[in-house]
Amino acid sequence: MASYTTVPGSSSFITNMNDLGLSAFSSRSSVFSIPKCRKSVFKKIVSVMAPKQSQREPATTGSVKTAMTMTEKIMARASERPQLNPGENVWVNVDTLMTHDVSGSGCFAIFKREFGENAKVWDREKIVVIPDHYIFTADELANRNVDILRDFCLEQNIKHFYDIKDRSDFKANPDYKGVCHIALAQEGHCRPGQVLLGTDSHTCTAGAFGQFATGIGITDAGFVLGTGKLLLKVPPTLRFVMDGEMADYLLAKDLILQIIGEISVSGATYQTMEFVGTTVESLSMEERMTLCNMVIEAGGKNGVIPADATTFKYLEDKTSVPYEPVYSDERARFLSEYRFDISKLEPLVAKPHSPDNRALARECKDVKIDRVYIGSCTGGKTEDFMAAAKVFLNSGRKVKVPTFLVPATQKVWMDLYSLPVPGSGGKTCSQIFEEAGCDTPANPSCSACMGGPKDTYARMNKPMVCVSTTNRNFPGRMGHKEGQIYLASPYTAAASALTGYVTDPREFLQ
């Protein structure tokens, strides 16, 4: 099967897509390597690049409006400009600024240094402060950071501060939420057509709602606190068209691992990654969040998915703030367009020590593991745990390695104990996990995803091999610098827990 794609103002590709086990095409080379556990296999790909089309000359009479992408439209609205082009630098009005305990103290200090000790923030209702990273620890510096958040929010009367005071029982803290990127969505701070900036690289998760969402540093955040504005460069857009029905053993994590494996961890540097196609349209909001969450792992500035009925349904009971979705024009200019036939995709993993070190899960069946970790903003949502429970339920077996479960938010934690798993006869995730011999679901937080203090739950304090639903597998990411992390979907993580080896989930789902 051949796929021919023409992108206005960009390139066209002719690709041989036979044997698409790991497939899609690459715009950068005629040969690419598919990582395996024991050896590399090379597949020829025919890639014919058309000459770059010249930009259309403006008409000599009247006014001509150039078509724009979603990201360009959002930034044009936010900068009060009728038209924007990639590469332009514009002052953007920010709709929402988010910070958490790791970065908050730094950006608050910069704000006071630059604007004055008695300065007031630009808008107390547009700032969201979410302690989530290093919460359930005895580390004094980590605890101090949360105290700094609290003092600042009380001083500035910040409306959306999700505080935690009693770390011995998170349920005693009605305001505490958990992981910021999931809490932002659950609390209605993610809205189509708006600009959301956060002092965390995975702020791009919110692009699932059709908004411009990206991570910024503490200096930029300190400036936004005082002005509500930030100077941003308009990124060019890469479009990823995913069509075909997803098999019942695939999840959005497999989709994004496929894409990152295709373009590399630098393949979208300071570019927008726009996701469209019938496969994307079929995804739930939580799955779309997984897809956009790992855009930063490809170097992307932001990820974005067009808002549709699924988006609007999710937001119905979460926000009363008006919003206006935007969509890419038919003749919008994309830097490149990639097409994938998802019906031929197989379960994937990213081997140590890079998210683009892609391999088929079945090719790593001889990799013995020491533990499994299911959690984080990428893999700790309700649907992620439902997926893992489905594998455990179908197998009827117990796990062979320690399996740690960390709900992203307090709401997810409650779902594990209250929502019945389909086909289980009324059993909840927590019951299925207990029967499978998993660890008891932990306090909702980022936990071991970023390592953290030595007493962080499930942190790897010695060299281990872990299959994880998190988003990064760099050396030291989850603790010990010699630890080995295999990134995988909740399906693959649960299947691996049952065997003690990296395992293709089809073993238990078909």
Image (tube, rainbow, N blue to C red):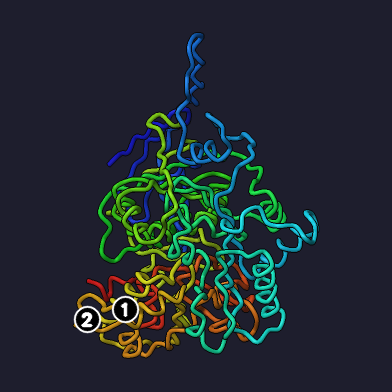
Q: Is residue 38 visible?
A: no
Residue denoted by label 2: 424
Placement of the N terminus among the 4 image quadrants: top left
Q: Position of residue 21 (x, y in %)?
A: 33, 56
Please say if 193 is above or below 151. Answer: above
Please say if 26 is above or below 498. Answer: above
Q: Is residue 342 left or right of residue 510?
A: right
Give, as a three-letter code, the residue at label 1: Ala
SS at badge 1: helix
- Which mark is on residue 389? 1
Residue 46 found in image quarter: top left
Give, as a three-letter code, the residue at label 2: Ser
Q: Position of residue 40 (x, y in %)?
A: 47, 59
Placement of the C terminus among the 4 image quadrants: bottom left
Q: Is residue 324 visible?
A: yes
Q: Residue at x 79, y 54 (%)?
A: 114
Q: Position of residue 492 (x, y in %)?
A: 37, 72
Q: Tell me which label, 1 or 2, sits earlier in the chain.
A: 1
Q: Position of residue 125 (x, y in %)?
A: 56, 58
